[in-house]
Image: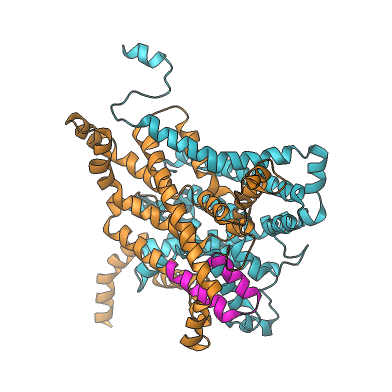
Amino acid sequence: MASRSSTRWRFRQPSVIPGFGLALGVTLAWLTLIVLIPISGLIWRSSGLGWSKFIELTLDPRTVNALTISFGTAFIAAVVNLFFGVILAWALVRYRFPGKRVIDAMVDLPFALPTAVAGIALTALYAPNGWIGSLLEPLGIKIAFTPAGIVVALIFVGLPFVVRTVQPIMEEIDKEVEEAAATLGANRFQTISRVLLPGLLPAGLTGFALAFARGVGEYGSVIFIAGNLPYVSEIAPLLIIIRLEEFNYAAATAIASVMLLLSFFMLLVINMIQAWSRGRYGYGS
Amino acid sequence: MAHDAGSASITAPSRAIEAATSETRLARAMLIAVALGFVVLFLLLPLTTVFIEAFRKGPAEFLAALRDPETFSAILLTLTVAGIAVPLNLTFGVAAAWAIAKFEFKGKAFLTTLIDLPFSVSPVISGLVFVLLFGANSALGPILQSYGIQILFAVPGLVLATVFVTFPFVARELIPLMQEQGTSDEEAALSLGATGWQTFWHVTLPNIKWGLLYGVLLCNARAMGEFGAVSVVSGHIRGQTNTMPLQVEILYNEYNFVAAFAVAALLALLALVTLVLKTALELRYSDEIAASRRH
């Protein structure tokens, strides 16, 4: 019996729970209507352009510039978030200080606050007459309406990703590992850099990749603070909208396909990090 | 002197043990300072700015800005769109979680990846796909137009874009939770003679209600606050297809800062209420919502 059922190919394991057909049917129908058809529409449209036209559109200098700016600023912001996110998570997990609960809850603010609200708030802060902008102006530092402004907005947007991926892993660190390191004569710095941080690496990288992917596609919080100067501070999502407003659907589709392709690649990288981490460190979600 | 030396020899061992598995007091203080500074600079200051700018010219101006008919219709439209999109994704999320968590079938991992897909797509692209599907130069658009059905630059387009963007929220929250809970409760109910629906309503739903609320909360926050996707399909018709975040943009670009920040303050308030409820759920019902807290 057992050998027969294991050799026979089955779509699903038998179960007494009812409703599989209905639940899967609703899921597949909704998924197809809302996600798969629209996304395939985009892919179909861009494949209709033909290779030479597609290459020509993506190699347009303004497009290349916009993509470089989007990926470059998202990368810098994700690096900043990786560094400060790990410190913030460490402080939240290991230390006690007043207001800790509130700060822990606040970390999710970028998930909850609409991006347009974050955008105008950051612009008001970093504009030359804003609280922070007016402090930086005498030093000759300009944030708002420059690429630095884009980085600031993307740091805000990506902040929770690193903290929320690293935090649960830190909570599970076995104190005995640290004690063992200390017993063997490691000082605190060595324990952290050689024992604790390598174990946090996969979670940190996953958080980094999530923040980076989010930053590349971000629109709402960026457009207010960026200044949106073509070739200087114009991000790829904005260029898509500009092309759409010019009724240049071909160019909009081409930029979107490149971005979609790159974000699928990011998704693949994230999955690979997690598979590697499961094998190497025994965790990963 | 002798007293000092004596107390040092007593406290020295405990200090040494503590130093082995925790940082020095100075390092600790510095790390906390860096963490707090980062939070204040990037989270607290922007949030405070929204309310300060909204009340810059006093509460009367703030209220006047909200009483503007176009702003009022934007608030109404946001409530309408979220009111349609959230229940749709709630239904979908429960169905998807039921299929994925309660059964073992081929291609499950792939299906889960597809459900997560909208999270990795730029909001602008999420809007663009519907423009390509229903726009004037698409195959479907003119046909629907001839029947008098308007999708883009109207409520259906806004709902579609919002549903796309908030697609994974409820499912993502419920799947790990229901997987953790297993199927034994349902099997018990079924063996006692309950029908499938009775089992769902009286056994499964009470088990997942807090997780469901958690997912709906996040779904709603994103639905009401979505900007990029909605911006592409809205057409920005004043008083008709502008949701609250789009109204913020329009007022801001007209240099009507007090009004822009007044609408923004309402949205920030929504975000704060969401965070408070979310934290309360995490503290009170941490066992009954999924362990994963990232989105």
Q: Quadrant of residue A104?
A: bottom left
> At x 28% / y 65%, what residue is drawn?
B13
Of residues B213 and B4, the one nearer the viewer is B213
* Residue A153 sits above or below residue B156 on the image: below
Residue stretch in magenta: B243-270
Of residues B225 and B196, the one nearer the viewer is B196
Query: Is residue A110 visible in the rendered structure shown here?
Result: no
What secondary structure is the stretch in magenta mostly built from?
helix
- Taking A284 as reference, is B240 left or right? right
Q: At which x and y percent is residue A88? A: 45, 64
Of residues A99 and B102, the one nearer the viewer is B102
Q: Which chain is orange?
A: B
* Residue A211 sits above or below residue B205 on the image: below
Q: At which x and y percent is residue A55? A: 80, 43
Of residues A106 and B215, the one nearer the viewer is B215
Give the drawing colour for chain A: cyan
> At x 45% / y 60%, what residue is drawn?
B221
- Is residue B266 on the magenta stretch? yes
Q: Quadrant of residue A12?
A: top left
Q: At which x and y percent is residue B234? A: 61, 59
- Taking A175 as reference, is B60 left or right? right
Query: Is residue B45 visible in the rendered structure shown here?
Result: yes
